[in-house]
Amino acid sequence: MEENLVVSMPRIGDKAPEFKAVTTQGNIIFPADYAGSWVILFSHPADFTPVCTSEFMTFATMEQQFADANCKLVGLSVDGLYSHIAWLRTIKDKIEYKGMKDVEVKFPLIEDITMEVAKKYGMMMPGESSTKAVRAVFVIDPKGILRTIIYYPLSLGRNFDELYRVVIALQTADAFSVATPADWRPGDDVIIPTAGSCGVAKERMESKDENIKCYDWFFCTKKLDKETVLKTVIRKK
Ligand code: BEZ
């Protein structure tokens, strides 16, 4: 392993590491500039590469959908600002892909030629590449806490519907004090936190409330309709 790439790895529950950066949308102070919003900070390996291009077109097309859920997007690669600008202009002017065309990337793309931010966030994985960041995703809440971290290798384009699902699921968990089961989507039943005492567990197991279903003492769900979830998490401006 290359010694200069031995770096810190932020963890879920940590405060998002702070940095100042130059982006395609001006300078930012992170995460302070995003206080009060959810934010997805994500890295891509390199400008002018095909998988990254497909990802940026997809993410840019969904930007309003994320904004409606109070979630902002911030990209990063270890390329320079002029490379970023030229690549994003090429995407807008020349690339038509899967029905997407004339796509303007309006969210900031950080230049990180020194790899300062990439190292701080554990985006450099020398076993995969010592010159390019992997596809890292950090979902950060309005208080600046890292809530979800996902890594993909260079060859694998991300599923942006899944990233949207993650944001909505985290907001739902916070708003309703519940957890979300496998493959959860708004409208599906949610998980009631495990009862803290035998008495509460027994009461829940025997509950006649038709909104509650217990599979065993440690696994109870309740209905939470889609409209209620969306009304809570989607704030169209
Ligand atoms: C791509 O985005 O296509 C890519 C970038 C770096 C390595 C491999 C693929």
Image: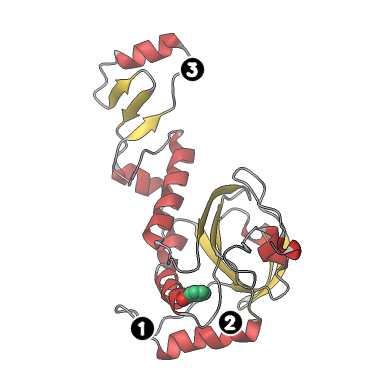
Observer-nearest of 3 and 201: 3
Assess mark 2: CB under 8 A from ligand 1?
no
Marks 1 and 2: which is nearer the front?
Answer: 2
Q: Badge 1: few (under 14), some or many (20 or more) residues near its Cα, within 10 Å?
A: some
Q: Residue at x 44, y 74 (%)?
A: 51
Residue 101 - label: 1
Image mark count: 3
Judged from the image, the secondary structure of the residue bearing numbered disc 3 is loop
First along the sequence among labels 1 and 2: 2
Residue 81, position as x, y percentages in the image: 64, 82
Q: Is residue 237 visible?
A: no
Amino acid type of the residue that numbered disc 3 sits on in the rendered structure: Gly
Determine the secondary structure under disc 2: helix
In the displayed structure, 204 sits above or below 151; it is above
Residue 196, which numbered label? 3
Q: Evaluate if marks 3 and 1 touch, with contact meaning CB atoms under 8 Å apart.
A: no
What residue did someone put label 2 on?
Answer: 84
The answer to which quarter of the image holds residue 235 is bottom left
Query: Colour mode?
Result: secondary structure
Label 1 is placed on what type of residue? Answer: Lys
Residue 19 falls left or right of residue 54 = right
Could you tell me the amino acid type at mark 2? His
**Residue 199 vertical placement versus 91 (above, below):** above
Q: Residue at x 51, y 83 (%)?
A: 48
Residues under labels 1 and 2: Cα distance?
A: 18 Å
| Mark with earlier residue (3, 1) | 1
For the N terminus, the image quarter is bottom right
Q: Nearer the viewer, residue 14 or 133?
A: 133
- What is the secondary structure assignment of the residue under circle 1? loop
Residue 159, image x, y percentages = 39, 61
**Quadrant position of the C terminus in the picture:** bottom left
Give the alpha-carbon distance from disc 3 to disc 2, as whole Å: 51 Å
